[in-house]
Image: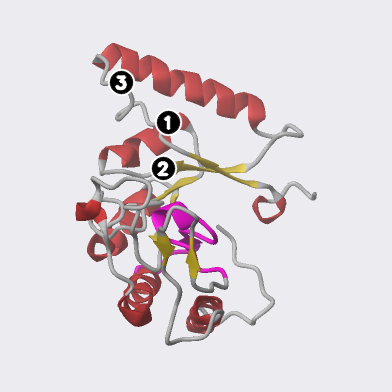
Amino acid sequence: SDGSASSLPLVFLYDVSAEHTGGGSPAEKRRARAAWREVMRQVRGSPFDATVLSLFLDERDVDFVADAGFDGAYSYFAASGFTEGSSPGGWRTLRQRMAATGKAFAPSVGPGYNDTLIRPWNGGATRPREGGRYYDEMWRAALDASASVVTITSYNEWGEGTQVEAARPHVTAAGAAYADYAPDPSGAYLDRTREWILRGRRERGCTAEERVEL
């Protein structure tokens, strides 16, 4: 490692925001922010340094990320509209607000969402794949937001129906059926992912091999 941002490990923190964990008084939230600032102070320049992104739920995280000393935030959830952060229509504004504090906003794109096999009561969060259109629309929104980095939820989270890895039809011993990508081939979402990555690089004027700074 040469110590530059592009050579550091990328670390994702989930649900650590003082604004969203356990309520708490304003004083407690200030102490939580101060604790994270101290953690980041000790990490910076050490062998454990990293580019650190925190989960972004809503606008309160703009200040939290800056105060805590993180490098930015990611939206994580593949269900469009589940949180403010996972609402593609607001990504450009969130990216601009984060940039104003010197922080990155990384929108998370997903192919759809369906966790009813593990959370039968949560059908309201289901987002159909629509033959790939849902994934395409999230990617288009992420690129239109001029984000410097895009994350994908997910590669193989089958329990929440967000996988993009190659898939084939499968029925468990209990009779639960996991969706495949028919009539598209098993690797359709990996092909789609590559197409969007290359498109994003072209739109930014990057070569296929060039790395983009966060």
- Circle 1 crowding by C-alpha within 10 Å: few under 14, some 14–19, many from 20: some
63 over 113 or under it: above or below = above
Measured in 3D between alpha carbons, the distance from the residue under mark 3 to the one under mark 1, in whole angstroms, is 10 Å
Q: Which residue is mark 2?
A: 55
Instruction: Please tell me which of labels 3 and 1 falls first in the chain.
Output: 1
Q: Which mark is residue 22?
A: 3
Type of the residue with mark 1 = Val
Main SS class of the magenta portion in the image: loop
Disc 1 to disc 2: CB gap under 8 Å:
yes
Which secondary structure, mark 1? Answer: loop
Measured Cα–Cα span from mark 2 to mark 3: 16 Å
Q: Residue at x 44, y 52 (%)?
A: 174
The answer to whether residue 141 is above or below residue 122 is below
- Look at the image and tell me in which quarter the C terminus lies: bottom right
Q: Which residues are magenta?
A: 145-165
Q: Which residue is mark 1?
A: 16
Can see residue 1?
yes
Residue 50, image x, y percentages: 64, 41
Decide whether residue 58 is among the magenta residues: no
Marks counted in the figure total 3
